[in-house]
Image (spheres, helix red, strand yellow):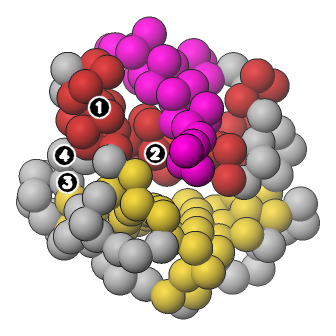
Amino acid sequence: MKRIVFTGVGGQSVRVISHVLAMALKELGYEVALLFDYDSSVRNTRISAYLTYDERPIENPMIDEADILIRLHEKGDQLVAQKTICDTGLCTDEEVPFGMLGIEKFGLAIFGNMIALGRLFRLIDLDISHIQLEKLLPKSYLKENLKAIQLGYDLNLYED
């Protein structure tokens, strides 16, 4: 069983990217559980998505320790995780300037969340060429989101 936690603030599309991953895993035949924890305010308050997936039915979807934590904002939960991937300045494990890349490549920091999703697809060894992402993503900014996911998937963080 694999456990992934996304954490950030409202407005960063934590719900969207966790839902896209859940649907992609479902499409590939996995059992998936996705739970959300967030304040009732929409923007700039903490939000977390807890995703569990396995080849067998999931008996308990609650997560106290994650295999991977995607941390997109300083207000996001700091959960114990085997690997943490975060925007620059938010951890000491794997830092990626998701927001800055979103601005540089697509003109908006919000595309950093799709870059993070692409990075996550690579880390959990999902071949995105076998997933019909265009059916899973929101229709607005579809082309940009697909390019941002590909950018994250192709990221080589260890270039010299």
Q: Residue at the spot x=57%, y=25% of the render?
A: 150
Tag 2 secondary structure: helix
Tag 3 secondary structure: loop
Measure the C-alpha gap from mark 4 to mark 3.
Answer: 4 Å
Query: Quadrant of the rendered structure where residue 25 is?
Result: top right
Measure the C-alpha gap from mark 4 to mark 1.
Answer: 15 Å
Q: In this view, does 109 lie to the left or right of 81?
A: left
The answer to whether 65 is drawn above or below residue 151 in the figure is below
Q: Residue at the spot x=43%, y=84% of the render?
A: 79
Q: Residue at the spot x=34%, y=14% of the render?
A: 141
Res. 10 mark: 3
> Can residue 38 be seen in this snapshot?
no
Measure the C-alpha gap from mark 2 to mark 3.
Answer: 16 Å
Q: Which of marks 2 and 1 is nearer the N terminus?
A: 1
**Amino acid type assigned to the residue bearing label 3 in the image:** Gly
Q: Where is residue 126 in the image (x, y as percent from the top left)?
A: 76, 42
Residue 145 belongs to the span the image colors magenta: yes
Query: CB atoms at circles 4 and 3 under 8 Å apart?
Result: yes
Residue 46 belongs to the span the image colors magenta: no
Q: Earlier in the sequence, mark 2 or mark 3?
A: 3
Q: What stretch is highlighted in magenta?
A: 133-160
Q: Which of marks 4 and 2 is nearer the N terminus?
A: 4
Res. 102 mark: 1
Tag 1 secondary structure: helix
Res. 116 mark: 2
**Amino acid type assigned to the residue bearing label 4 in the image:** Gly
Residue indicated by mark 4: 11
Query: Quadrant of the rendered structure where residue 27 is?
Result: top right
Measure the C-alpha gap from mark 4 to mark 2.
Answer: 15 Å
Q: How crowded is mark 3: few (under 14 residues within 10 Å), some or many (20 or more)?
A: many
